[in-house]
Amino acid sequence: MITRSRSRVLPLLAVLVVVMATTSAWAADPPVGDANAGQAEVGSVCAACHGADGNSTDPQYPKLAGQHAAYIEHQLESFQRGKRSNSIMSGMAGMLSQQDIANVAAYLSQQKTSPGPMDTDQVALGKSIYDNGVAAVGLPACESCHGPEGLGDSAKLYPRIAGQHAQYVVQVLTGWHNGQAWGDGPHAKLALSVGQKLTVEQIHAIAAYVQGLNALK
Ligand code: HEC
Ligand code: HEC
């Protein structure tokens, strides 16, 4: 009895598993970004805050030009899922399809980041934290993840930060310092611990240094 029903059910199950594996692999295939379509979408919606080429002029809005496509996609999906929350961006990201996200990410990642000015008063403290971290509180050097020139690492989803507006960097690090995480994934926890190990004074110095990073090197 048992052997007979098994012999019918097992092949059927095997077929089902194969079909499911194929369809879910299809569904998981990310759409390929079209930079031209992305340019039009950025121009009509995002440019008001982030600039037509992703170089925002208002320093409360992050520059997106030259950011890794994978990181832009990851953050837009985070806003969509409510893991990273922001009253403006949660609404903006909610309007985008997966294809739109791939398009804007392709376009923005191909633009050149405009250099930011370096605040010379803050260079020494900012550079020391960037290059060496703060051993007393177990803070690793920023460069160990973001790279010596602040270019990040696309494969690891470590963002490019060179040239980013100091005001935005202060906003982000202060949020983490105060315990506002971007979700509960390993990267969100890591970023939270970076913010919490920095003092307010160190946050301002490191932000000023990061803003001028691509002008310096
Ligand atoms: C009305 C202003 C506004 C508009 C329009 C806008 N954004 Fe934003 N965007 C913001 C703000 C503010 C933040 C910072 C959010 C935060 O602090 O968490 C942000 C953050 C982002 C981030 C995260 C960047 C990072 O470095 O972590 C991405 C990606 C992004 N926006 C993409 C877009 C795209 C794509 C569009 C157009 C579809 C768009 N934004 C439209 C205001 C705007
Ligand atoms: C161990 C790796 C690691 C170290 C060390 C590290 N970061 Fe990061 N950083 C990350 C990751 C990962 C993210 C993205 C967080 C996420 O996706 O939730 C990030 C995000 C950021 C962002 C937000 C960029 C944006 O536009 O979204 C800033 C700013 C930043 N880091 C600055 C710093 C500074 C300054 C230091 C040194 C004090 C530092 N980080 C040290 C891994 C690191």
Image (tube, rainbow, N blue to C red):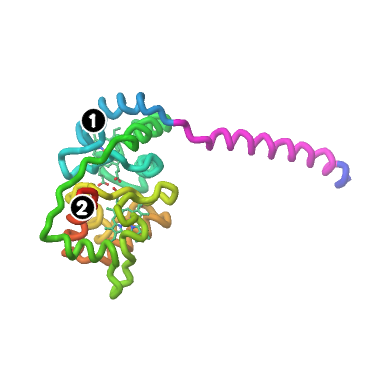
**Residue at figure coordinates x 28%, y 70% from the top left:** 134
The residue sitting at the left extreme is 121
- Quick one: label 2, few (<14), some, or many (20+) residues within 10 Å? some
**Residue at figure coordinates x 39%, y 50% from the top left:** 153
90 in magenta = no
- Quick one: label 1, few (<14), some, or many (20+) residues within 10 Å? some
The kind of residue on which mark 1 rests is: Ala
184 in relation to 128, above or below: above
Residue 34 versus residue 98: which sits nearer the camera? 34
Which label belongs to residue 216? 2
Residue 178 versus residue 166: which sits nearer the camera? 166
Residue at the spot of label 1: 52
Left or right of 13 in this view: 34: left
Which label belongs to residue 78? none
Task: Determine contact: label 2, label 1, CB under 8 Å.
Answer: no
Secondary structure under tag 1 reads loop
30 in relation to 143, above or below: above
33 in relation to 190, above or below: above
* Range of residues picked out in magenta: 5-32
The kind of residue on which mark 2 rests is: Leu
Q: CA distance from mark 2 to mark 1?
A: 25 Å
Secondary structure under tag 2 reads helix
On the image, the x and y values in percent for residue 151 come to 32, 49
